[in-house]
Image (cartoon, helix red, strand yellow):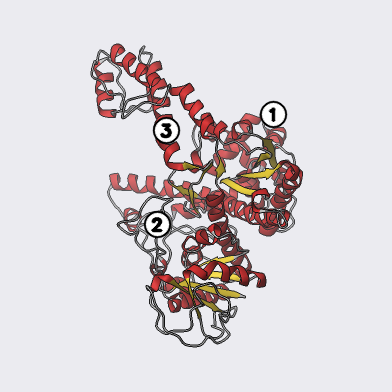
Amino acid sequence: MPMLLAAASEPSHTPAPSGPAGPAGAKPAGHGATSAHLSGQPRDYVYLQELATDGTPLGEPLVIHRDNLAQTVKELEENHPRWVWHRTQAFYPELLKAGVIIERCHDLQLCGQLLSYSQFSAHTDYAKNAVKTLTTEDRPEPPQALLPPAPSPDQGSLFEETSAPSGPTLEVLRAEYTQQQAALAQSQHRERLQLLLAAESAGSLIAAEMQFAGVPWREDLHEQILTEYLGPRPTGNNRPKKLEALAQELRTLLNSPTLNPDSPQELLRALHRNGIEVKSTRSWELQQSQHAAIIPLLAYKKLARLLSANGWSWLDAWVHSGRFRPEYVVGGVVSGRWASRGGGALQIPKNIRGAAHADPGFKLIVADASQLEPRVLVALAHDSKMAEAARRKDLYEGIAAEGFGGDRAKAKVALLGAIYGATTGESGRLMPQLTRMYPRAVGFVEEAARAGEAGHTVSTHLGRSTPPPSQAWLASQQSTSAEEQRRANSWARSRGRFTRNFVVQGTAAEWAACWLAELRRRLRAIGTNLPAGKRPELVFFLHDEVMVHAPQELVEECVRAIEESAQTAANLLFGRIPVDFPVTVAVVDSYDHAK
């Protein structure tokens, strides 16, 4: 049963709002609420309307005061509805704060973004009429009507209470949902596309729940780590003691008494004055020089990175009440991988992972999918010979035993080169051997690369498609001069590398989304009858890795859920195929002990 939930930004009629003390006495959506006058600002209210599967409204909408929304949703959750809303972030965080967890949803913005660009729905009116604003191969935008509102100019910090924003009207959202369902019904790959939309929407719930739960974080341990590496917390804008000592050493070695090592321009000029002819201050280029200043300079850059990315300012801004709570962006990368907005959640460096520490009586269960992308390639290409190698826990060892004289390193370089388009160096030298051994797998990514070079669109297994090439790219392919043609060929090869990897990385992201969704379902079942503070929770996700914070007595059950969810994800995507998707699991007290 779809249940549409919308911000009441422009109420055009006046069905009865629920009472100030809660929804008691208010009639459920779709059962004929009576008329009454609305008081207060429009954004103080939300619309709630029951829909048929195709989006047809069932009865009149109910208008609910925002203060009563959580209790109403909690009561309706007993009927297992699928909540349909503009975007999950517009409603779910406030529901979580009120202790309400919902089972499933349909995020119109995320789903609209997928349907607008998918080749599986390209022939539908929905995709043809979508307003597409891409100029580069960046993350596709959703339909214009579903773009999020601009932030208020007086909006405070991430954790500050703000007024609920108004969104698209009920009529707009209902029409959007109807059109999306019609596009699904017209797709020749409806089941795949439907699974993709469900997994993406489930991901939006998981992202909000992980932000709410947060990664358990010991501020005292983080302080100890920073003090060990940098020295005591400095005052004002001063550098930490150890960093300042390195800066002073560099000033001496480079004969630059006023050098600011944090300024690339100043540093580059100082290096040049001392005969260190580098084009940039990147670490890999600096390592080519034997000058005495290089070792302390590299040490300085490493510590400066720690200070800027995860130092005391980061700790003060992002860790509260023993939890690190970043905001995740579902499908934030064009391939479908997640991104994060602030806090660098997807780039937690090894030297501070010790601060991610389980609460007393709990454990961190860290699991990652072993060699996910190569295994996804096997499934996509239907390469039965490589599937035999994939039955080993270590796929690269299996490939090495078949044709690289048992040299695992060579097998890994060859296979990753095929996936990422590395055609030079060691990878290029090994590619012919890999092609002879596994023509179907190599042929699959080669076909995707050729399609990209020609400007065509490629799609993942469930139907996420590459955005079209930009107008500048298309114009370059029509060039006639030799210089412009060389540039056009370079751009074409670059797009070919992008599409080659897209089909594999994007399908791996789909597998991970299904893994997350199934794991969430199983963890909820495990914690059904437990109080809120004693339930296992998903608290972190990174591409092919999950972290569960679980009570010690539930660890074994949670590990089993993680492993079984991985196989369920594979079955959902590919059916029952002879390819294993094993996960490596570590049960630890702190994140730094996981690997």
- Which quarter shows the N terminus? bottom right
User: Circle 1 sits in a helix, a strand or a loop, which is it?
Assistant: loop
Q: Which mark is residue 312?
A: 3
- Which quarter shows the C terminus? top right
Residue 215 location, quadrant: top right
Pick the front one: 26 or 51: 26
Q: Are marks 2 and 3 in contact (CB under 8 Å)?
A: no
| Mark closest to the chain's N terminus, 1 or 2 | 1
User: Circle 2 sits in a helix, a strand or a loop, which is it?
Assistant: loop
Disc 3 crowd, CA 10 A, few/some/many (<14, 14-19, 20+): some
Q: For the residue marked with disc 3, what is the amino acid?
A: Trp
Viewer-nearest of labels 2 and 3?
3
Q: Is residue 531 left or right of residue 57?
A: right
- Indicate whether 401 appears above or below 29: above
Which residue is the site of mark 1? 405
The residue at the point 36 percent across, 62 percent down is 133
Q: Position of residue 361 (x, y in %)?
A: 69, 39
Pick the front one: 532 or 341: 532
Disc 2 crowd, CA 10 A, few/some/many (<14, 14-19, 20+): some
Q: Position of residue 181 (x, y in %)?
A: 55, 75
| Residue 70 visible at all | yes
Q: Position of residue 300 (x, y in %)?
A: 39, 22
| Mark closest to the chain's N terminus, 3 or 1 | 3
Counting labels gives 3
Distance from disc 2 to disc 3, alpha carbons, whole Å, reads 42 Å
Which residue is the site of mark 2? 469
Q: For the residue marked with disc 1, what is the amino acid?
A: Gly
- Indicate whether 98 appears above or below 217: below
Distance from disc 3 to disc 1, alpha carbons, whole Å, reads 50 Å
Disc 1 crowd, CA 10 A, few/some/many (<14, 14-19, 20+): few
Pick the front one: 158 or 462: 158
